[in-house]
Image (cartoon, coloured by chain):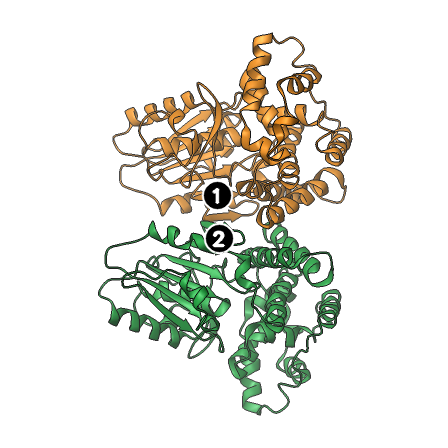
Chain colours: A green, B orange
Amino acid sequence: MVPKVVFGEGCFNQLSSILSSQAKEKAPFIFLVDDVFEGNTEFIDRIKIRFNDKLIFISAAHEPRTSQVDALVKGIKSEFTTIPAGIIGIGGGTVMDLAKATAIMLTNKGSASDYQGWDLVKQKAVYHVGIPTISGTGAEVSRTTVLTGPVRKLGINSDFTPFDQVILDPELTKGVSKNQWFFTGMDCFIHCVESLNGTFLNAFSQSYGEKAYDLCMEIFLDDTLSEEESRAKLMMASWHGGMSIAYSQVGVAHAMSYGLGYVLGTKHGVGNCIVFQHLEEFYPKDVLLFKKMTLKHKIEIPQEICKNISETQMDTMIGVALGMVPLWENALGANWKSIITHEKLKELYLKM
Amino acid sequence: MVPKVVFGEGCFNQLSSILSSQAKEKAPFIFLVDDVFEGNTEFIDRIKIRFNDKLIFISAAHEPRTSQVDALVKGIKSEFTTIPAGIIGIGGGTVMDLAKATAIMLTNKGSASDYQGWDLVKQKAVYHVGIPTISGTGAEVSRTTVLTGPVRKLGINSDFTPFDQVILDPELTKGVSKNQWFFTGMDCFIHCVESLNGTFLNAFSQSYGEKAYDLCMEIFLDDTLSEEESRAKLMMASWHGGMSIAYSQVGVAHAMSYGLGYVLGTKHGVGNCIVFQHLEEFYPKDVLLFKKMTLKHKIEIPQEICKNISETQMDTMIGVALGMVPLWENALGANWKSIITHEKLKELYLKM
């Protein structure tokens, strides 16, 4: 778990005092910042770059890749003679995941793709801080960093992955577009549904999952919250949702969304929504609620994205989805193969 | 926050593999174990004492004292030439708090009483593990260790206080007596009520507090849970309740209960119950619910414990309670002194 967290509107201002306790002579802090903030001088000035610190803008247009991590690490190593004092990720799930992976790969040999899996990381990562500016993915609290590699889309799951410090400032999520707000919020809702309906559920995950689920219901279906309350609550929903899956597993929507992401590059949040709307047979009550939320907020979920894909693409997509064994086991139990076949997935994907 | 946690029935068996990663040559692990387990060889055998490890039984008959911490540290330092590799607390709130304080005082000079307050600890504590065997206090997750010192009852609140590892095994709470189960569970319920009704509340604490509150309602008022589910859920209620007050504050019941504890040695859990039953004017809805729970489980809350105390004792008790400024500010706002006077507290204590 993340050992240190500060919370509250405006607490982003504590960043430089938090970092000062980690300062080391000549060692820079590297800030990975979502490029949505490029040109936003008011915001960038608040980061307080000093000495040889470096700010790198990151595009979140694509899901993070192992090659991107390798390039970041190579760049940092060639520019600086000392290992950085810290990596600070400021952005959504993509930037969070890149920050975690970069911190790991600065102290571990080889390529990020060598560490996709469970507990393969040997050396402690560089000190790393997560500052989410979009709520929902749970990447700020999770023990993984999901990366698209040369052969698979899979996380680096390890005890060294979680951030050393997280700064939860709901004010930072103010400028998020409505679609992004919804899709990323639904990432939280959907992984709670999958965790709470999974066979791996336990009282630990259940308590976190239920709270995040309740918060999502309040945020996306009630009309009682102010904007400020809603922002703060979604940030907490993301946090608890991430904690819930840390000790359980996701399910059908995530397995199939990984397939979409791998083949079509569909972003994780919207990919989950594209899949989830067609999962009535697995999560009947919650797919109904999801559709209610979609209507209420007038969100258009992309349709027919698999209509024109090739047979090879379809096979790859199905292969990636079927490869997510723990997700299927969680969703449907040990006998999941009697329910989920190549044909079944093809039928489902063709609806999307 | 606690960086590492395992959860689940039977996960106590992971203790020795968890400790093996922290082993250092010649350095012992010191196990502080609630003396309720003395003579329970089946349980003690599961701890797997090795080499020069040491097991110390701790009586939880009294609230933990700074002098007790100092004596434990002196004993350990005189017996071993190296600093221990770890302190492992196995028990309820008292043992948890002693384990945390002992770990701190092994690396910090002077008496534990020098560190009662906020952020006074200078050196990182010895690696310490918390294993609760009673649920409710939140001591397994909190950033404090409440101790009775020569001049006050106050916690050592610091970044070094939280456990490095917690093992949440609901099975360990099986043998707890009904009264103890209720009083300690109500500690959780009451600190959630105080946090949720406090002026310091924020979305972070609220989300944890609401979840713990909901779990308490389910555990103590519904009849739908199996014993196993109820045990697991109370362990999680304790966890979330502790997280809730980590980022907010308690209130009237805790302030007055500290007074009882200081003067009469009343244990924290039962002290909270003794006070809370008379706080209708501050927490009307929740005092009613509390009385319903008391009736449902046929619990007798001690009555008239202040009947025969001396004037001096009463004055000391009121002085201790009034000294808890942040608790009153949280409960009643900046103008709390217009509501809570010496006379008002005397009137309330005389009801107890």
Tell me if residue A260 comes above or below residue B88 in the rendering: below
Quick one: A43 or B22, which is closer to the camera? A43
Tell me if residue A127 comes above or below residue A179 in the rendering: above
- Between marks 2 and 1, how big is the CA–CA gap? 28 Å
Name which residue type carries label 2.
Answer: Cys
* For discs 2 and 1, the disc positioned in front in the rendered view: 2
* Residue plotted at (68% across, 15% down): B350
Tell me the element at label 1. strand
Question: Which image quadrant is residue A104 in?
Answer: bottom left
Name which residue type carries label 1.
Answer: Val
- The quarter in which the C terminus of chain A is drawn is bottom right
Tell me the element at label 2. helix
Residue located beneath label 2 in the image: A11
Q: Chain of mark 2?
A: A
Residue A156 in sight = no
Question: Which image quadrant is residue B321 in?
Answer: top right
Residue B47 in sight = yes
Mark 2, other Cα within 10 Å: few <14 / some 14–19 / many ≥20: some
Q: Position of residue B214 (x, y in %)?
A: 69, 45
Q: Chain of mark 1?
A: B
- Residue B9 is marked as none
- Residue B166 is marked as 1
* Residue plotted at (45% across, 44% down): B165
Q: Position of residue A126 (x, y in %)?
A: 34, 59
Question: Which image quadrant is residue B313 in?
Answer: top right
Q: Position of residue A162 (x, y in %)?
A: 44, 57
Mark 1, other Cα within 10 Å: few <14 / some 14–19 / many ≥20: many
Tell me if residue A51 comes above or below residue B37 in the rendering: below
Side of B91 relative to B30 (left or right): right
Q: Position of residue B125 (x, y in %)?
A: 36, 38
